[in-house]
Image: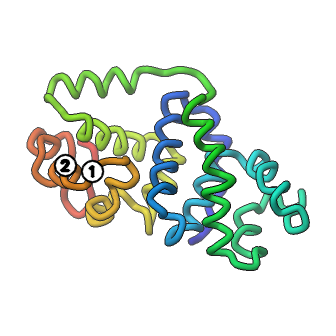
Amino acid sequence: MTRMRNLHAHFKSFSREERKTVAGYLLNLIDANFGNKFSEELIAFCVDMIGKKEAYDLLKPVYVEKVDYSDIDHLFDWVIGKLLKPNKDMAAILHNIFYPALEKQYKHPKGRSNLELNKRLDHLQETFNLSDDETAILQLFYLMNTNIVVSTHLGNSPLDFSDFATLRDLGHYVLGLNRKPFLTAISTGILLDTGLLENEDSLSIA
């Protein structure tokens, strides 16, 4: 994976509602043990969500002799380059260090409040009689189109959820949904029947 620029500065401008939702996506992926296969991608996602200084402050007490303040601008490179057992250590960092910080963001998100997206989703849900699962799928696609952190980390290979095959195989994990109704929603449900989602090689919000 090619490390992209730190996006935490962009994430600071997002609403509390977006922060809560995106933190929930990461918590779902870690709960589903995606850290075993996609540890580099999730570490990068977490650093952009939490912030490099905050991530450094979390790592330093655990890796006292391994991480130095000079590493703060290159935490991702440090994680994948200086750990003795990178895959095992990255999974431990995700579960034991970053997970509690993400839970805090999920339960007590900071920033301005903006209920406009929730109002729009509620309106669509009522108008088209959408299930909660279908509404959650719409929200994911909306954020992939409008939120640079989400589009960077959930809209690029290998975790590109705009790709139908990836969404079909892994999408229920990121949203924390049961697989069977999720598959129905993206393949034969009202989202496609009404044109709210367009399904070709890649899914997009209409």
Location of mark 2 (residue): 181
Give x and y (percent) for residue 75.
75, 61
Q: Mark 1 is on which residue type?
A: Asn
Residue 3 visible in the displayed image: yes
What residue sits 85% from the left and 54% below the top?
Answer: 61
Give x and y (percent) for residue 138.
29, 40
Q: Under tag 1, what secondary structure?
A: loop
Query: What colour scheme does the image use?
Result: rainbow
Quadrant in which the N terminus appears: bottom right
- Mark 1: few/some/many CA within 10 Å (<14, 14-19, 20+): few
Location of mark 1 (residue): 178
Q: Is residue 140 above or below residue 29?
A: above
Cα distance in 3D space between marks 1 and 2: 6 Å
Q: Mark 2 is on which residue type?
A: Pro
Residue at far bottom of view: 84
What residue sits 11% from the left and 38% below the top?
Answer: 194
Whether label 1 touches label 2, CB < 8 Å: yes
* Residue 77, numbered label: none
